[in-house]
Image (tube, rainbow, N blue to C red):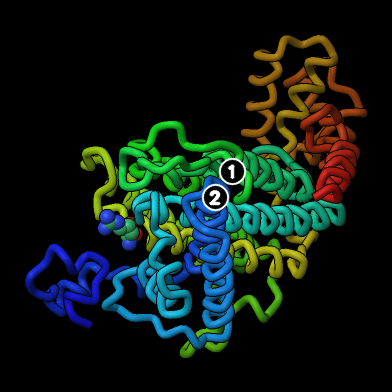
Amino acid sequence: MHAKDSAWSGRFSEPVADFVLRYTASVGFDRRLAFADIEGSTAHAAMLAHVGVLSAEDLVAIETGLAQIRGEIERGEFAWALALEDVHLNIEKRLTELAGDAGKRLHTGRSRNDQVATDVRLWLRGEIDRIAGALSAVQRALVEQAARHAATIMPGFTHLQVAQPVTFGHHLLAYVEMFERDRERLLDARKRVNRLPLGAAALAGTTFPIDRAFVAARLGFEAICDNSLDAVSDRDFALEFCAACATLMMHVSRLSEELVLWMSPRFAFVRLPDRFTTGSSIMPQKKNPDVAELARGKTGRVYGDLTALLTLMKGQPLAYNKDNQEDKEPLFDTVDTVLDTLRAYAEMLPGLEVNAAAMRRAAEEGFATATDLADYLVRKGMPFRDAHEAVARAVRLAAQRGCDLAQLPLAELQQMAPGTGPDVLDALRLESSVAARDHPGGTSPVQVAAQVERWRARLAQR
Ligand code: ARG
């Protein structure tokens, strides 16, 4: 490849140095945008013909050529050339081989600056839809486990100290809520992804009588970008997407951390199927929750991708700068990491086995129903602050004796908390404790079952 072959050779007297070629080329990674590029070019050509800038014959030659190129790429036959810098110039060069002058006319009224912004948006729109689907799959898996464990009792924690009993189903449904917000954020960002930069050309617009609404409609964009300078230089849409994915991965990471804890023999709350765990090369007894740990670790990459994009943008004067070529790898990495991670979870969660006895034992330790005793005393007429203090004394006594609240003799309880009757034993049972939290948002099995039904109906519509 010589300087005279490049798309701008007219202005240059010597070819670009080999290393500079390699340094500036993006075709090694941006070929991933090839189908979006072909889709965008096809729409652009159709618009040029529609407004009379391109002849009908040229349009046919371009459409036929682009369709052939698509086939070559799909079959792995396309010869990508580093010397042609990026996906756009590679495809355009091949089109010119196939379609002659018609191929050379495709770039009329367009620049790679609005072209690449269009391609990334088209591509990202599809990926957002895939991620939204993958999120729903994880939600389904969580909802079905929640259905199975609507009444399974575990200790709920605050400060990682046993706090109050909760149902495992309720705990899992908390993650369904988080993933629903992630989905909402992604679909909201999609609206701003789904706008058409094409027509901005290099930065100022074009002298040709283009019809941007035509292109937008053809490509399914909801609107055009209204300012040409903004159109070629804006990457907010990618940033927003990465920020939503960073939050999503933070949620995955919290769930991962819990799985790692619960898998630990100290907890022994859950088991994961062997195909999602690994052994140790030296310690024969080990079963490690690698998938959960990696998901937690990969959260860091996605944060890194977001930080890379923010940093990439902060120093750029308007309008397009070559810096923007660096937007792709972080974006691709985020999409790949999120999709793989969600897939792993959608496949792993249905195989999660719960050790209900271990959960129950843990809930029985740590005076998890102390609040229930205080509430009981309040119902008998004691002000809550006094009840809190009375129960604290009872807890201290039970702790000294190494017994549970329910094992304290009734007479002693009555001394500390006048008004206590034999029915206190019922208030101290784990089942009564969770069942009593029977209002929307509460942990009772009845509420969990209702949440499950609501989610099932919602997810069935996707
Ligand atoms: N490969 C470039 C990118 O990813 C395409 C746009 C190049 N535009 C330019 N004026 N050099 O951003």
Label 2 SS: helix
Three-letter residue code for mark 1 = Phe
Q: Position of residue 233 (x, y in %)?
A: 33, 43
Picture quadrant of residue 191: top right
Residue at 23%, 67% (x, y): give it. 24
Q: Could you say which disc has been placed on residue 74 in the image?
A: none
Query: How many C-alpha atoms fall within 10 Å of the one at disc 1: few (<14), some, or many (≥20)?
Result: some
44 or 118, which is in the foreground?
Answer: 44
Give the vertical position of 301 relative to 313 (above or below): below
Q: To which residue does mark 2 refer?
A: 47
Q: Nearer the viewer, residue 405 or 58?
A: 58
Q: Is mark 1 within 8 Å of ligand 1?
A: no
Name the residue beneath numbered marker 1. 214
Residue at position x 69%, y 41% from top?
Answer: 177
Image quarter of residue 29: bottom left
Identify which residue is drawn at 80% across, 52% down.
143
Quadrant location, ligand no. 1 = bottom left
Of the image marks 2 and 1, the number of the one nearer the N terminus: 2
User: Of 401 and 235, which appears nearest the observer?
Assistant: 235
Q: How many other residues sit within 10 Å of disc 2, few (<14), some (14-19) or many (≥20)?
A: many
Q: Are marks 2 and 1 in contact (CB under 8 Å)?
A: yes
Give me the C-alpha separation between circle 2 and circle 1.
6 Å
Name the one closer to the observer, 74 or 146.
74
The answer to whether residue 202 of the structure is visible from this angle is: yes
Name above or below for residue 297 compared with residue 275. Answer: above
Tag 1 secondary structure = helix
Q: Is residue 154 rendered to the left or right of residue 234?
A: right
